[in-house]
Image: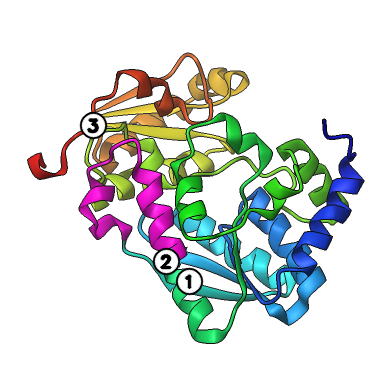
Amino acid sequence: MNTLDQNEKYEHLKQLIGGMGRTLIAFSGGVDSTFLAKVAYGVLGQDAVAITALSPTYPATELEEAKLYAAEIGIEHRLIETHELEKEEYAVNNPDRCFHCKKELFTEMQIIAQDEGFDTIVYGGIMDDLGDHRPGMEAAELLSARAPLLEAELQKSEIRQLSQELDLPTWDKPGGACLASRIPYGMRVTLEKLHQVDQAELFLHKVGFRLVRVRHHGDIARIEAPPADLPRLFQGEVHTRIVAALKEIGFKYVALDMQGYRSGSLNETLASHTIVPLQTV
């Protein structure tokens, strides 16, 4: 049984990173990868480089924040293009979609590592990820990408607290995920759908909802927000503005999920999902 406290895990993390040599970090600008980049840069200095994928599956606002956070840390930050949307095994949107996305990212990172003499590729996997459907972790294992936060047995709550102590602006940032996670399994991922989700969530952020998801169900936009925020969706003219904006984006109907926001809500359908053979798409 692990008996390490938060600070001991933090020291263990730094020891792990110290033995990794020149390191490439998969950097999304989220809570975990930003903390990892901060610690890696503190330990390795110029031998740590952050890599962010340029992809239509990545929210535009998240990209700008990633650039800002990397600059504040001082770490070298590179943007690379990934093309998972062009791959049929990704676009068909089976439950293993994230495997193909992360495989694309880690493959591109491996090329950089081999060309430039980097020793290790890392990403921000944590202990909390072990209890959810995370096929991306299988891709990481396949391509030898390490998860030092997971190896140090750090939980999300501990990473947030340590991030606050390090004055990282992400310490209380809501969890994020790629835009394709808003599209139910079995519904094809397309550039148009990704753009609609991105624009819809951007509008909701602008009217004051910090944590929100717009799930794409064809003609229907299903909004998820924390239960405490649900009454705000009907205050004043907010609901009228939201409906009008989302219809202009391309949805015919705008629905509110009464259960509220929950991470990975589309995974609730996994037990009944039927795999779509690639040759039939």
Residue furthest left as drawn: 280
- Which residue does the image show at 59% across and 40% down from the upper left? 175
Secondary-structure class at tag 2: helix
Vertical comparison of 125 with 87: above or below: above
Q: Mark 2 points at which residue?
A: 107
Quadrant (top left/top right/bottom left/bottom right) for the N terminus: top right
Magenta residues span 84-106
Distance of label 3 from label 2 (alpha carbons): 25 Å
- Proximity of marks 1 and 2: CB atoms separated by less than 8 Å: yes
Vertical comparison of 90 with 73: above or below: above
Q: What residue type is labelled 2?
A: Thr
Q: Mark 3 points at which residue?
A: 275
Q: Which amino acid does label 1 sit on?
A: Gln
User: Seen in the image, is 265 located left or right of residue 18?
Assistant: left
Secondary-structure class at tag 3: loop
**Location of residue 24 in the rendering, given as x and y in whole percent from the top left corner:** 60, 70
Tag on residue 28? Answer: none
Numbered-mark total: 3
- Picture quarter containing residue 58? bottom left
Secondary-structure class at tag 1: helix
- Which residue does the image show at 45% across and 26% down from the upper left? 265
Q: Which of marks 1 and 3 is nearer the N terminus?
A: 1
Q: Mark 1 points at which residue?
A: 110
Q: Which amino acid does label 3 sit on?
A: Ile
Distance of label 1 from label 2 (alpha carbons): 5 Å
